[in-house]
Amino acid sequence: MEQLGFYFDMTRCVGCKTCQVACKQRNNLPMGITYREVHTFEVGAYPDATMYHVATTCNHCENPACVRACPTSAMHVSEEDGTVQHDDDVCIGCQQCVNACPYGVPRYFPELKIVGKCYACKDTRDFDGAPTCVAACGQRAIEFGPLGELQAAHPDAVADIACFPSSSETTPSVLIEAKPRALEESFRELHL
């Protein structure tokens, strides 16, 4: 099994949220729930202030905290590609995965009493070639594929940026082409 993951090029992202909207529409998600989110952060102070955008979703970690916390194995790692998947039929809605994920990825659906999350469009990837968010990005800031190939194609990409929790515990399958200021600890999230 070759681990699949995401690459995100922060230097190309303009914060348009097209990936977020496409994911929401593709998954027919209710108001207030998204699987992919675009966050905007500011660093520095006038006259040396700048901002950057980060498009986040499930990092399909190699050692996922959500899987370790799930009492029913509804949250599990796919043996085919290493992505973290969720089985709605086995989920009991206990939200242990929601509480365990350091990235805040799993979403609870109160009306269904189950959890949902990004599944990297596993059901349509073979036909579409890529998850919906990747195909929707007009700036081509998101890629998806074998992690080794992504690392070879983007050798300067990192797994840790200041606004993310440390990757040491979960080993996320995500690489980020980070702007230098995204590594600074003095960030502030902007709510646009």
Image (cartoon, rainbow, N blue to C red):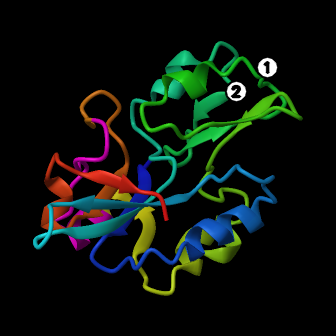
Tell me, for residue 92, which label it has, or none: 1
Q: Residue at x 44, y 38 (%)?
A: 103
Is residue 155 found inside the magenta-colored segment of the image? Answer: yes
Q: Position of 170 compared to 109: left or right?
A: left
Query: Vertically, is 122 above or below 160?
Result: below
Q: Residue at x 35, y 31 (%)?
A: 170
Q: Position of 164 compared to 64: left or right?
A: left
Q: Residue at x 79, y 30 (%)?
A: 114
Q: Earlier in the sequence, mark 1 or mark 2?
A: 2
**CA gap, disc 1 to disc 2?**
8 Å
Dot 2: element: loop
Q: Which residues are magenta?
A: 150-165
What is the three-letter code of the residue carrying label 1?
A: Ile
Most frequent secondary structure within the magenta stretch: loop
Residue 189 position in % (x across, y down): 36, 53
Query: Vertically, is 19 above or below 174?
Result: below
Q: Residue at x 37, y 48 (%)?
A: 173
Quarter assignment of residue 151: bottom left
Using the image as rendered, state which of residue 46 and residue 15 is in the foreground. 46
Disc 1 + disc 2, Cβ < 8 Å = yes
Is residue 134 found inside the magenta-colored segment of the image? Answer: no
Query: Vertically, is 172 above or below 36?
Result: above
- Label 2: which residue? 74
Using the image as rendered, state which of residue 192 and residue 94 is in the foreground. 192
Residue 138 position in % (x across, y down): 50, 87
